[in-house]
Image (cartoon, rainbow, N blue to C red):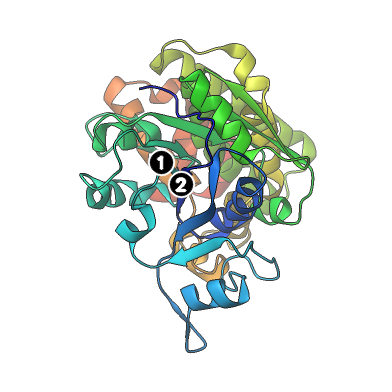
Amino acid sequence: MAGLLKDTRDLRVAIIGSGNWGSAVCKIIGNNVVQSEYFQDEVRMWVYEELIDGRKLTDIINQDHENVKYLPGIELPANVVAVPDLLETTAGADILVFVLPHQFVTGICQKLKGHLKEGACAISLIKGVDASHGGLKLVSSIIHDSLDNIDVSVLMGANIANEVARENFCEATIGARNEKNGQLYFELFHTKYFRITVTKDAATVEICGALKNIIAVAAGFCDGLNYGSNTKAAVIRIGMREMLNFAKQFYKGVEMATFLESCGVADVITTCFGGRNKRVSEEYAKRNGSKSIEELENEMLNGQKLQGPLAAKEVHVLLKEKGEEANFPLFTAVYRICYEGLPVQQLLAEI
């Protein structure tokens, strides 16, 4: 697919998703498009319609410029238009920004198929993998295969949404196999506080984004059991080793240097100390499993979704199929604790 960079100001951007991370990202995109020669000023954002105190969430975002449910207290750009209809959001769009829980991607793509502008490209900010397609597939591959081989890049990094929205300095990594599209996405996302690097090693960027959430669940268990910093650091190191080995074993062309970018080690650190996967798994351990992960997710996350337990489940499907469970003991232990009733206190014995 040819790159989309042009000299005219006519590229339309559509954001698919409007949760915590999607709303933080729309602030970046909305501010950047009006300062760039490449993009139309209006950015449409697909919003799953909800009623908040009797008002439609789309009306609140469009009138008050705030997502009061998923990113309260942050002003969103006025040129970001919330739209409840998916096809209306994406009509005529040149760039699709996917930023929603990965379990919804297949259904969204089915609705989009046959309705996209010719030559459109996509970038996925979704951290997860999927085992429902006969083998383990990256989210970018699902989008690519479902939407007639659309070019799909990825953006991953040490990015807690609320901190990004407050413009705290951080970094992110874009994996783009198409160099011109990589330049385009740099223009769309880079700011003084959100520093972007671009690499062609898109698969490794995305693998890191998916697997780090499993490590974060294990780190949260450590905190909930009061294991201390030494133990937590050891568990994180074991998890990172498994992440590296998994990437090398199941994907071609993995570049070790990519693990030192924001999508790799930095994202692991951030997620293991401050992300939602760590917080919920910590609470699970504190309560000694008296409430399920799903119950705590519903109780603690205000409609947001966890990715770590689901990623562990998806990865386990492949490991079991290949007979590799023993070579990835931390990934396997997280799966067994979350889904098979293994006592959380058994974590260290399993790894």
Which circle marks residue 94 in the picture? 1
Does residue 114 appear left or right of residue 350 in this picture?
left
Residue ID at (63%, 41%): 36
Amino acid identity at mark 2: Arg
Q: The residue tagged with tag 1: helix, strand or loop?
A: loop
Amino acid identity at mark 1: Asp
Which circle marks residue 12 in the picture? 2
Does residue 146 appear left or right of residue 203 in this picture?
left
| Cα distance in 3D space between marks 2 and 1 | 5 Å
Furthest residue toward front:
8
Quadrant assignment for the N terminus? top left
Q: The residue tagged with tag 2: helix, strand or loop?
A: strand
Q: Is residue 224 visible?
A: yes
Q: How far across and down, in percent of the image, does residue 175 sit?
A: 53, 25
Q: How far across and down, in percent of the image, does residue 312 sit?
A: 43, 39
Q: How far across and down, in percent of the image, does residue 291 sit?
A: 49, 65
Badge 1 density bin: few <14, some 14–19, many ≥20, Cα 10 Å = many
Verify CB contact (< 8 Å) between mark 2 and mark 1: yes
Q: Is residue 237 above or below residue 92?
A: above
